[in-house]
Amino acid sequence: MHVPPAFRRWTARLGLALVVAIAIGYLPGQLLRRDPRSAKIDRQLAEIAAEAKQLEAHNAALMREIEALRTDVGAIEARARADLGMVYPDEIVLRVEATP
């Protein structure tokens, strides 16, 4: 049986150890590096979450306005005056136009 010289055995062992050390040092960095697609998806998710929060606030304001129009006489009157131009029978309406 042929046994290689000690120098050649230790050189092969050292070479393999160096390859394993490089692989251990390089692979976790590659595994932990973020994929650019995932970063893009995270940005889109954040934008959608912000938009959802804005829509939720807008919906809450609309719900408060609906409830006020159902129960508050002052809100009903203000809406009728602003949107429909309604006035009481004894009121006088003066329209003033701004000069350019």
Image (cartoon, rainbow, N blue to C red):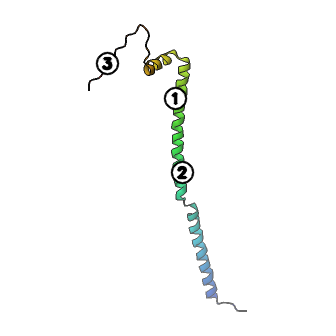
Q: In the rendered view, tell whether residue 36 sits above or below residue 85.
A: below
Q: Position of residue 98 (x, y in %)?
A: 29, 23
In the picture, the quarter occupied by the C terminus is top left
Disc nearest the viewer among 2 and 3: 3
Query: Mark number for residue 61?
Result: 1
- Front-most of residues 21 and 94: 94
Tell me the element at label 1: helix
Q: Is residue 49 rendered to the left or right of residue 93?
A: right
Query: Mark number for residue 42?
Result: 2
Label 1 and label 2: CA atoms lie apart by 29 Å
- Which kind of residue does numbered mark 1 sit on? Ala
In the picture, the quarter occupied by the N terminus is bottom right
Q: Residue furthest left?
A: 100
Tell me the residue that label 3 is attached to. Answer: 96
Disc nearest the viewer among 1 and 2: 1
Tell me the element at label 2: helix
Q: How packed is label 3: few (under 14 Cα within 10 Å), some, or many (20 or more)? A: few
Tell me the element at label 3: loop
Label 1 and label 3: CA atoms lie apart by 32 Å
Q: Earlier in the sequence, mark 1 or mark 3?
A: 1
Which residue does the image show at 52% across and 29% down from the upper left? 61
- Front-most of residues 5 and 71: 71
